[in-house]
């Protein structure tokens, strides 16, 4: 047994090692996507159909077997249709750019600080809010645009937008290219059937957009005055400003800096 293993290892080429690493990377990314989304239910359904197909052969259920055979003969097309959102996000992540491609690292740090400060200030005031940070995939085809702003990102401006007396407080702010592109935008609601039924419209909108694009959405809940970050349809609660800063730095591969370092 050991001799056979040594024989196989001894005849492996460098290309074989590269091949195994690439396959491992693809499988790993697929498992991560499955974990973060509701796709496990769809995969379970496909698994049940596969078992039914095997049983139809064993029990000689010819008509049922013929139907399932036609289904699995088009499995590739079906998988692409079912998982088009996940495939699109995965492809976008392969060629993902830094935080804001036309913005320096100093500006990126400043923007992260302003977003974190605004989110928790709004939570303390008891308002609700949605911040959409666009990445590689344009969200133009997924949202209904509100009022164009083209303004510098600042905590004070973000807080004023979501004040209950503001005409734009019900929508979402879109941050594009390091600027506040627009406010009062409306996002698509998630169609995921396994979402918690207690989630409100704001949460479903945040999850819905991240299911369709690679955008990051920061949500401030008006009901429980909490802050969360949504990515790839997965909501992660943030305990404080430090957590949100760290989450944004992690998303964009930047080194975390404290507030003292940022403004020194």
Image: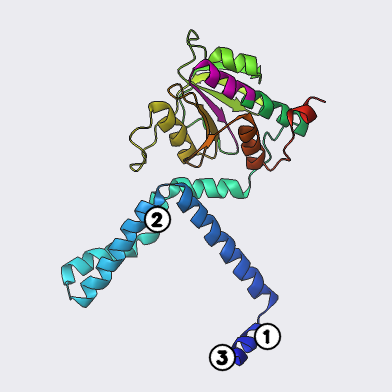
Q: Is residue 78 visible?
A: no
Instruction: Name the residue rendered at 65%, 72% in the picture.
Output: 17
Q: Is residue 47 visible?
A: yes
Q: Quadrant for the N terminus, please.
A: bottom right
Separation (CA) of disc 3 from disc 1: 14 Å
Looking at the rendered structure, the secondary structure element under dot 2 is helix
Separation (CA) of disc 2 from disc 1: 38 Å
Question: Mark number for residue 10?
Answer: 1
Nearest to N terminus: mark 2 or mark 3: 3
Using the rendered view, name the quadrant where residue 198 is placed: top left
Q: Quadrant for the C terminus, please.
A: top right
User: Where does the magenta region start and end?
Assistant: 117-135
What percent of the width, then of the height, locates residue 43?
Answer: 37, 57
Q: Tell how many labels.
A: 3
Nearest to N terminus: mark 2 or mark 1: 1
In this view, the mark in front (2 or 3): 3
Which residue is nearer to you in this view: 105 or 101?
105
Separation (CA) of disc 2 from disc 3: 39 Å
Looking at the rendered structure, the secondary structure element under dot 1 is helix
What percent of the width, then of the height, locates residue 108?
Answer: 71, 31
Which residue is nearer to you in this view: 219 or 22?
219
- The residue labelled by disc 2 is 79
Nearest to N terminus: mark 3 or mark 1: 3
48 vs 113, left or right, is left
What percent of the width, then of the height, locates residue 82?
Answer: 38, 50
Instruction: Name the residue rendered at 56%, 49% in the picture.
Output: 91
- The residue labelled by disc 3 is 1
85 vs 102, left or right, is left
């Amino acid at each position: 047994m050991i001799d056979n293993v040594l024989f196989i290892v001894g005849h492996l080429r460098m290309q074989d090692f590269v091949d195994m690493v690439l396959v491992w990377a693809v499988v790993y990314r697929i498992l991560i996507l499955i974990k973060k989304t509701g796709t496990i239910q769809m995969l379970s359904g496909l698994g049940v159909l596969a078992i039914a197909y095997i049983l139809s052969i064993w029990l000689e259920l010819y008509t049922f077997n013929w139907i399932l055979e036609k289904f699995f003969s088009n499995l590739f097309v079906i998988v692409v249709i079912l998982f088009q959102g996940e495939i699109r996000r995965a492809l976008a992540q392969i060629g993902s750019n830094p935080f804001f491609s036309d913005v320096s690292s100093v500006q990126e740090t400043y923007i992260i600080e302003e977003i974190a400060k605004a989110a928790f200030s709004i939570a303390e005031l008891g308002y609700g809010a949605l911040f959409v940070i666009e990445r590689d995939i344009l969200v133009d085809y997924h949202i209904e645009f509100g009022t164009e702003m083209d303004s510098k990102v600042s905590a004070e401006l973000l807080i004023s937008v979501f004040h209950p007396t503001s005409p734009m407080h019900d929508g979402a702010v879109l941050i594009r290219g390091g600027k506040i592109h627009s406010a009062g935008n409306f996002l698509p609601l998630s169609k995921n059937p396994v979402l918690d039924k207690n989630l409100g419209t704001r949460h479903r909108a945040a999850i819905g957009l991240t299911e369709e694009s690679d955008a990051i959405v920061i949500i401030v809940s008006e009901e429980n005055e909490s802050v969360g970050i949504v990515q790839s349809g997965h909501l992660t609660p943030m305990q404080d400003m430090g957590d949100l800063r760290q989450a944004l730095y992690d998303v964009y591969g930047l080194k975390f800096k404290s507030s003292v370092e940022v403004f020194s």
